[in-house]
Amino acid sequence: MRTHRFFPILAAVLLVVFAGASALSAQEKAITQDQIPKVVMDALLAKFPKASIDKCTKAREFFTIVYDIEFNQEGRKFEADIKENGTYINYEKSIEAAALPKAVSDAIVKKYPNSVMKEIMEETEVKGKTEKLSGYEVVLQLADGREAEVKVSPAGKVIEDTGPRKA
């Protein structure tokens, strides 16, 4: 009989846990360039001095605010994720298909034969002063008109795959 008293308590605890977890998840909000904190802009311009910002979103990721900044520099598309304290998480730069490693190209062709690469972003993870190539994000136009996005490791392993979706 005592177990019946336990269920309302368990339900209340689970409700608090799930409500807290959803509050900690990313909730993106578009912001203007003048709303980007100075420390974040300083970090961006230190690495990319000729950055011309196209779009920026602000999101809470667990206990940190992250700014996702899309920009161009000297005709090339870039994207950077920078924490509110100016610390880089990663950055991406657009590249041509010819610059992809063979293992990456082969993995994409194997997964999506007869597709066309529409956009390729080379992603670099940043940990302190160490930068490491972490993968390639590729948007594909499939033969049936749908799109897919895959992330492939430098060694050619598919890390993420959206699967076909409407263009």
Image (spheres, rainbow, N blue to C red):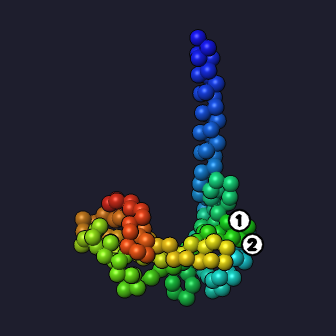
How far apart are the two marked residues, 2 and 1, measured between alpha carbons? 7 Å
Reading the image, the residue beneath label 2 is 39
Q: Can residue 122 be seen in this view?
A: yes
Element at label 2: helix
Q: How crowded is mark 1: few (under 14 residues within 10 Å), some or many (20 or more)?
A: many
Element at label 1: loop
- Name the spot of residue 13 as percent of width and height, x first: 64, 31
Nearest to the observer: residue 161 or residue 76: 161
Amino acid type indicated by mark 1: Glu
Disc 2 + disc 1, Cβ < 8 Å:
yes
Is 128 on the left-hand or right-hand side of 111? Answer: right
Residue visible at 38% across and 73% down?
Answer: 156
Query: In the rendered image, which quarter is residue 98 located in?
Result: bottom left
Residue visible at 75% across and 72% down?
Answer: 39
- Name the spot of residue 42 as percent of width and height, x first: 72, 77
Nearest to the observer: residue 28 or residue 107: 107
Disc on res. 56: none
- Name the spot of residue 110 as percent of width and height, x first: 27, 70
The mark tally for this picture is 2
Quarter of the image with the C terminus is bottom left
Reading the image, the residue beneath label 1 is 84
Query: In the rendered image, which quarter is residue 26 located in?
Result: bottom right
Residue visible at 65% across and 82% down?
Answer: 47
Q: Earlier in the sequence, mark 2 or mark 1?
A: 2
Name, please, the residue furthest toward the right.
38
Nearest to the observer: residue 28 or residue 103: 103
- Name the spot of residue 164 as percent of width and height, x first: 32, 60
Residue visible at 64% across and 42% down?
Answer: 20
